[in-house]
Amino acid sequence: MKILWSPLAAERVSEIAEYIAEDNPSFAERWVENVFQKIEELKVFPERGRFVPELNNNTVRELIYGNYRIIYRLEGKRLSVLTVRHGKQMLPLEEIVS
């Protein structure tokens, strides 16, 4: 399974890490490592995430990690990480619908 990160997803992880680092730099670093680890685990269990409730599309799924939603799309042998959002934020559908 090949994993691709969208520029938006990479940017969101960076923004979230910067925000966390304002209070706790070492936790921010561990948080980023854990997000990447969660995505790597999807190579073995790509359908582990639940369907995104806002969509009627069984190829778009999400993993919940702490307070965050890691949203990804399954496309055959490829997994595309679309975005990472805080669970309390509205999910703009334009971020995940292509």
Image (spheres, grey):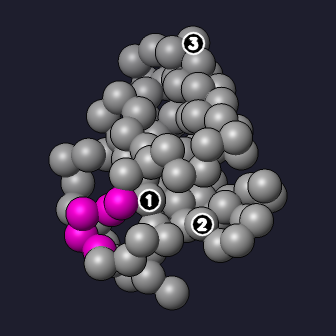
> Is 91 on the left-hand or right-hand side of 71?
left
Q: CA distance from mark 1 to mark 2?
A: 8 Å
> Is 77 on the left-hand or right-hand side of 9?
right
Specify the label residue 74 is tagged with. Answer: 2
Q: Observer-nearest residue: 78 or 65?
A: 78
Image coordinates for residue 43, horizontal then vertical, percent: 71, 45
Image coordinates for residue 34, horizontal then vertical, percent: 58, 26
Image coordinates for residue 92, horizontal then vertical, percent: 30, 73
Q: For the residue marked with disc 3, what is the amino acid? A: Ser
The residue carrying mark 3 is 26
Q: To which quarter of the image does residue 29 belong?
A: top right
Crowd tier of the residue under label 1, counting other residues whose Cα lies within 10 Å: few below 14, some 14–19, many 20 or above:
many
The region drawn magenta spans 51-55
* Secondary element at image label 2: strand
Q: Is residue 8 magenta?
A: no
Q: CA distance from mark 1 to mark 3?
A: 29 Å
Question: Is the residue 5 above or below the residue 76 in the image?
Answer: above
* Secondary element at image label 1: strand
> Is 25 on the left-hand or right-hand side of 96?
right
* Secondary element at image label 3: helix
Q: To which quarter of the image does residue 41 belong?
A: top right
Q: For the residue marked with disc 2, what is the amino acid? A: Leu
> Is 79 on the left-hand or right-hand side of 25?
right
Residue at far right of view: 2
Specify the label residue 61 is tagged with. Answer: 1
Quadrant that contains the N terminus: bottom right
Q: For the residue marked with disc 1, what is the amino acid? A: Arg
Q: Is residue 53 magenta?
A: yes
